[in-house]
Image (tube, grey):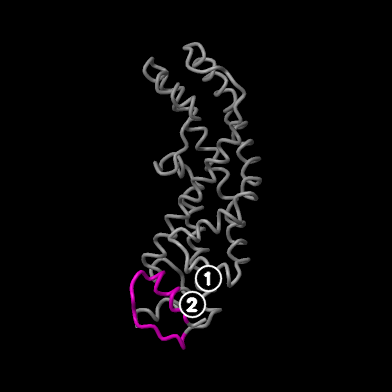
Amino acid sequence: MRKFILLAALLLSGAAYALSLDQLTSNDATAGLKEALTQGANKAVDLLGKENGFLGNPKVRIPLPDKLDRAGKMMRSVGMGKQVDELETSLNRAAEAAVPEAKKLLVDAVKGMSVEDAKGILTGGDNSATEYFRRTTSAPLGDKFRPIVQQSIAKVKLAEQYDKFASSAARFGLISKEDASLDGYVTNKALDGLYTMIAEEEKAIRKDPLSAAGSLAQKVFGVLRN
């Protein structure tokens, strides 16, 4: 277990420091990791679950579905840019409305983490915590997100916008008008965006755990600087 703690500390610090193992226990290491991951997950949710959280972030901004995206470029060239922008904005607003529901499930995933889970994250790759979240939360989060996305789509009459958009694109012979699952598309893109931002937070924690994490994690990793 001492070897595990030493390896975990060195991996997350990114550098070799003198470590007093007597100051740490396996419970401390696991609890410190949980605190850091909880903070990182909450920050990711807070960044995305607000106005322009998706729309204003090029890393996670949701584009139009593939065929419509290609059609949108053509439609902008013939003066229909406003219609394209309104549809894309609505897609992103629906995701922004859904993401706050992720916080509890992400925190519960951290609480349910076993010592073996923690060991796998600490000794795994740079995105091992993100993959843990994806593995344990993607299905229940999809179930949580979808009805909220559906409500958001209905609220801004996104389906009507889509119908008008698709009809216009069809007139140009760019796409065939089809019954696309917009709620499924937005839900999946919202999940992708969430895990992208969690990965960003994980990267920050691994680079500098002392400044990125909370007090208990600082206790665990603070010995690295002694």
Q: Which element carries disc 1, helix, strand or loop?
A: helix
Q: In this view, does 93 lie above or below 75?
A: below
Q: In this view, does 119 lie above or below 157?
A: below
Q: Residue at x 56, y 53 (%)?
A: 134
Label 1 crowding class (10 Å Cα cut-off): few <14, some 14-19, many 20+?
Answer: some
Please name the residue shown 60% across and 36% down the image. 184
Q: From the image, give the main secondary structure of the stretch colored magenta.
A: helix
The range drawn in magenta is 3-23
The spot of residue 181 in percent (x, y) is: 61, 30
> Residue 119's mark?
1
Tell whether position 56 is magenta: no
Residue 149 is labelled as none
The answer to the question of whether label 2 and label 1 lie on touching residues, with beta carbons closer than 8 A, is yes
The residue shown at (55%, 47%) is 99
Classify mark 2: residues with Cα within 10 Å, few (<14), some (14-19) or many (20+): some
Q: In which quarter of the image is the C terminus?
A: bottom left
Give the residue at x 60% y 67%.
113
Q: Where is residue 213 in the image (x, y as percent from the top left)?
A: 44, 68
Q: Does the magenta stretch include residue 5?
A: yes
- Which type of secondary structure does the marked residue at label 2 adopt? helix
**For mark 2, what is the residue?**
4
Q: Which amino acid does label 1 sit on?
A: Lys
In the current view of this chain or complex, which residue is farthest to the bottom?
22
Q: How many labels does the image show?
A: 2
Whole-angstrom CA distance, mark 2 to mark 1, is 7 Å
The x, y position of residue 192, in whole percent, is 51, 45
Q: Which of marks 2 and 1 is nearer the N terminus?
A: 2
Q: Which amino acid does label 2 sit on?
A: Phe
Depicted 215 relative to depicted 87: above or below:
below
